[in-house]
Amino acid sequence: MATNSTTAQSYKQLKEDFVSNLSGGSVSEIAQVCAVAPVVSLVWSVLQARQSFFRPYTPLGYAIDFLLNVGALLLSVTLYSSAPLLLNLLLLTVAVFVYIVPAHTRRKKPQLPPNAQSKKSSSEQPLGVLSTKPFLTNYRGNMLIVTCICILAVDFRLFPRRFAKVETWGTSLMDMGVGSFVFSAGVVASRPVLKERAEGKTTPLSTRLKTSLRHSLPLLVLGFIRLLSVKGLDYAEHVTEYGVHWNFFFTLGFLPPFVALFQSALKVVPSYAGLALLLGVIYQVLLEATSLKAYILTGPRTDLLSMNREGIFSFFGYLAIFLAGQDTGMLVLPRTLSGSSNKTSGTVQRRSLLLNMAGWSLVWVALYFLATDYKYGFGLTVSRRMANLPYMLWVAASNAVLLLAFYLVDALLFPSFYSAQDAKTEKEIYDTATSKVLRAYNRNGLAVFLLANLLTGLVNMTVPTLDVGPGATVGILVGYMGLVTAVAVGLDLYNFTIKL
């Protein structure tokens, strides 16, 4: 009995050591891996736009949908982890081949007389102020899929250690993943703010706080459940990631009330981007000018605050990332031009959105280089552990560029979306231009993420992941993602939304 206990403890220590003291990889390699997602979106979109491959949506269509949007991303962090550029080139070759193949022609509907078209248009539901654009679904769906893959893959030797979370200083794919999760949540959170502004309403702070607490409560409950299960099951944990008791669900749970408070500051600072930068700069100044940095990195763990110092203080960096995401949402969610039938209006709308997104991408990239460049900037180093200013800027810049890439695919292959005159037409084009798999992940993102966490724990308790070879690792990951995806698609198929 004692021998079994000792063996279990030593294996737990091995697993903790496996994810500890890592230094990450280069920003350029991480960018190449992240680029797989928009390139996959290009392949999928070419198949749909040129060949109508996913209409109707058959079992074969689902299989290809899964292989592209899940399988390619899985390959990018496992078998092709050392050659992400090659994987991108192979996918681009497929996209070019599909594009040059003669397009599949669909039978056109008969045109209605002009007066009939006018009557039909007047009966359609008008376009609203906000728009669920296809590229946003593609971006968020891919981000969720990569996150679900990595949280289990990191426990296997096939997953490169340079992709796992960095101990203190440096960049890694999983560091980008956790920041992107928060950034994308900020993008989505801009929707109620935009609706409120469109209606000319101003919600009192007390009401905003009550609403935010309702959103926070389920996340905080999940945080406590994770805490109790990790401690109760003696699950391997990396203390320097968030602290002794803190976990990512607590970070997510405390965001809504703080965002509600910061919304009041918009009377002084005119934009969420300004708030994000102000918070990030103040936090960085405190790290550099006080003993806060040393306290977070080397302080003794003597009380509740010091035991969880990484999670508590990095929260301010994640709050800045959330606000940066919210600013991006304020840019990309509104329908800038609507209700016009001519092609010029759609062209102007696409060009306007492109210029704005490209401009902000350049701003975030420039600020990141200013913060980190040793010759022309401040020479700061990224730290996900503290969620410092360079980390915040890196996440914002990377996600802004990724969104721009997804948008370019959208605008090139499904431009008619931006010329839709009514909600029904827009919805039809949206359904055509988005993958069912990505829509499913996007619809129940947090619930699917929770399921992935539960399955990750189950696999780790039943499989000696450090002893599994490459072939078996890929098999386990494919089965795991197959189950997660099937649940997500099933929920979407039965029109079921789980709100957490």
Image: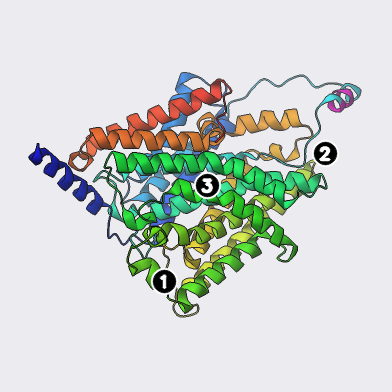
Amino acid type of the residue tagged 1 in the rendering: Lys
Q: Secondary structure at mark 1?
A: helix
Q: Distance between the Cα atoms at labels 1 and 3?
A: 24 Å
Residue named by callout 1: 293
Q: Distance between the Cα atoms at labels 1 and 2?
A: 53 Å
Vertical order, 379 against 236 (above or below): below
Q: Quadrant of the N terminus?
A: top left
Residue named by callout 3: 253
The residue lying at 49 percent from left, 23 percent from top is 490
Q: Is residue 121 magenta?
A: yes
Asked whether residue 96 is in view, the answer is no
Q: Quadrant of residue 67?
A: top left
Which mark is first along the chain, 3 or 2?
3
The residue lying at 56 percent from left, 60 percent from top is 320
Amino acid type of the residue tagged 2 in the rendering: Gly
Residue named by callout 2: 339
Amino acid type of the residue tagged 3 in the rendering: Gly
Asked whether residue 320 is in view, the answer is yes
Give, as a single range, the part of the protein colored magenta. Answer: 117-122
Circle 1 crowding by C-alpha within 10 Å: few under 14, some 14–19, many from 20: some
